[in-house]
Amino acid sequence: MKAAGEMRRAVAAMEGWPSASDAATPRHGLALHLGELLYGNIGAANRLDFTCIGPAVNLAARLEALAARLGRTTVLSAEFARHCNTGLLPLGAFALAGFRAPQPVFGLADEA
C-alpha cells in the first residue's frame, strides 16, 4: 500500500502534469492482488518470453483494466483487501472475463 501511494504521488508530481479535466492527462492504473502464479520462459526456441501466467495474473490484468473504467488509479482484489486494515472503499462486484462469479473490487477511500 505504501508503494502504491508513493507511485500515485510520483506520477502526480510529474513535470507538466496537466489538469485532471484535460483529455491528454497521463494516466496510470494499478491493480493489487495476491495469488499463486507460474513464471518462466514460455514459447519456442526462436522466441522465448519470460512471463507470468495463471488465474492470479489474469485477475490482476482484468482489475487493472477495470481501474480505468472506474476512473481510479488503484483497485484491489478482495484477497488483497482482506490484508489491509483501513482506507478502503468497496466498489462493488464486477463480471470479469475468464471468471465465473462477479469479483469484489475495492478502491482507496482517499481517491473517492
Image (spheres, rainbow, N blue to C red):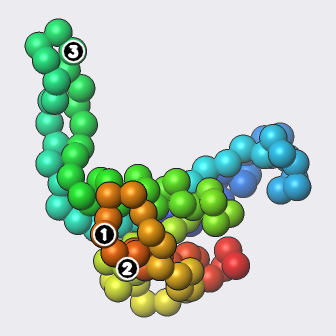
Left or right: 6 with respect to 19? left
Q: Which residue is mark 2?
A: 78
Question: Which residue reaches farthest left?
Answer: 45
Q: Nearer the viewer, mark 2 or mark 1?
A: 1
Could you say which quadrant of the image residue 111 lies in?
bottom right
Could you say which quadrant of the image residue 108 lies in?
bottom right
The quadrant of the rendering that contains the C terminus is bottom right
First along the sequence among labels 2 and 1: 2
Pinpoint residue 110: horizontal percent, then vertical percent: 66, 79
The crowding category of the residue bearing disc 2, from other C-alpha atoms within 10 Å (few below 14, some 14 to 19, many at least 20), is some
- The residue lying toward the viewer, choosing from 45 and 99, is 99
Going by the numbered disc 1, the residue's amino acid type is Arg
Image position of 35 with respect to 20: above or below? below
Q: Which residue is mark 3?
A: 47
The crowding category of the residue bearing disc 1, from other C-alpha atoms within 10 Å (few below 14, some 14 to 19, many at least 20), is few
Residue drawn where x is 19% and y is 21% of the image: 48
Going by the numbered disc 3, the residue's amino acid type is Arg
Pinpoint residue 53: horizontal percent, then vertical percent: 22, 46
Left or right: 104 with respect to 110? left
Q: Which residue is mark 1?
A: 100
Pinpoint residue 17: horizontal percent, then vertical percent: 80, 46
First along the sequence among labels 1 and 3: 3
First along the sequence among labels 3 and 2: 3
